[in-house]
Image (tube, grey):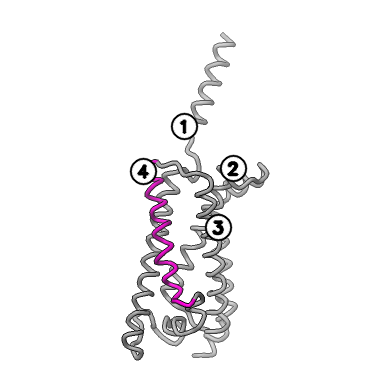
Amino acid sequence: MTGTGATTTSSDSNAQDVAAPQPLGARTMGLLLVVLGGIGFAASFALSWEKYLKLLDPDRVASCSVNVFIDCGAAMDSWQGALLGFPNPYIGVAAFPVVVTTGVMLLLGTRLPRWYWTSLLVGTVLGEALVFFLMYTSFYVIVALCAYCMIVWTIMWPLLWYQVVRGVRAGDLPVGEGLRDALVGNRHIILVIGYLAAVTWLLLAVGGPLVDSF
């Protein structure tokens, strides 16, 4: 009886382990990529369209220019708005469809190789580095914020962070077991902390100039 009970308990435990949902599984990750990539593409396309209309009519005020502080035109007219010789939003128009396509493949059950995930992560890291640069220039040089740009900034952080978490959980990014458990288990908390850090940076950087403008 004891042996049978132990076997039953072990079987139940294994069944629970199998049935337990894995954090950031393929379907969850696929949905995240589709939603975040779709939002990023929409914002990039909108800003690209505004740039096109601005070229047709240099005197046109962009629809995303609300006041002196929220002004897409200031960002578009600066040299930082075209780092590679063409408007930065074109990068998003080209890159975010790759993110969306990746998400669709995951939702369809496609198993992606490790090199693909690594390439996507590297591209996202480069994109986040560009975001940090543009945030810095917007806060301290242009002293104006672009509404569509901020949408891209907002979705880039979870796009990067959840790829890191997926990589750590899957073993693509080798870390110690303790660190892995901490990152995966606290993934949502760390995401929120990242947003709080960005908002704090914004308030510290532009809070003074904004108050002085009133």
Q: Cα distance, mark 3 to mark 2?
A: 16 Å
Q: Is 43 situated above or below 102?
A: below
Q: Secondary structure at mark 3?
A: helix
Say few, some or many: other residues with alpha carbon within 10 Å of mark 3 (under 14 / 14 to 19 / 20 or more).
Answer: few
Q: Is 119 situated above or below 202?
A: above
Mark 2: which amino acid? Gly
Q: Cα distance, mark 3 to mark 4?
A: 24 Å
Q: Secondary structure at mark 1?
A: helix
Q: Earlier in the sequence, mark 4 or mark 1?
A: 1
Say few, some or many: other residues with alpha carbon within 10 Å of mark 2 (under 14 / 14 to 19 / 20 or more).
Answer: few
Say few, some or many: other residues with alpha carbon within 10 Å of mark 4 (under 14 / 14 to 19 / 20 or more).
Answer: few
The residue at the point 55 percent across, 64 percent down is 126
Mark 4: which amino acid? Leu
Q: Cα distance, mark 4 to mark 2?
A: 22 Å
Q: Which residues are magenta?
A: 85-109
Q: Secondary structure at mark 4?
A: loop
Q: Earlier in the sequence, mark 3 or mark 1?
A: 1
Of badges 4 and 1, nearer the viewer stands 4
State whether the magenta stretch is mostly helix, strand or loop.
helix
Say few, some or many: other residues with alpha carbon within 10 Å of mark 1 (under 14 / 14 to 19 / 20 or more).
Answer: few
State the residue in front, 205 or 127.
Answer: 127
The picture places residue 159, in percent across and down from the top left corner, at 49, 58
Q: Secondary structure at mark 2?
A: loop
The picture places residue 62, in percent across and down from the top left corner, at 36, 83
State the residue in front, 148 or 206.
Answer: 148
| Left or right: residue 59 compared with residue 160 | left
Circle 3 is placed at which residue position? 122
Mark 1: which amino acid? Ala
Circle 4 is placed at which residue position? 108
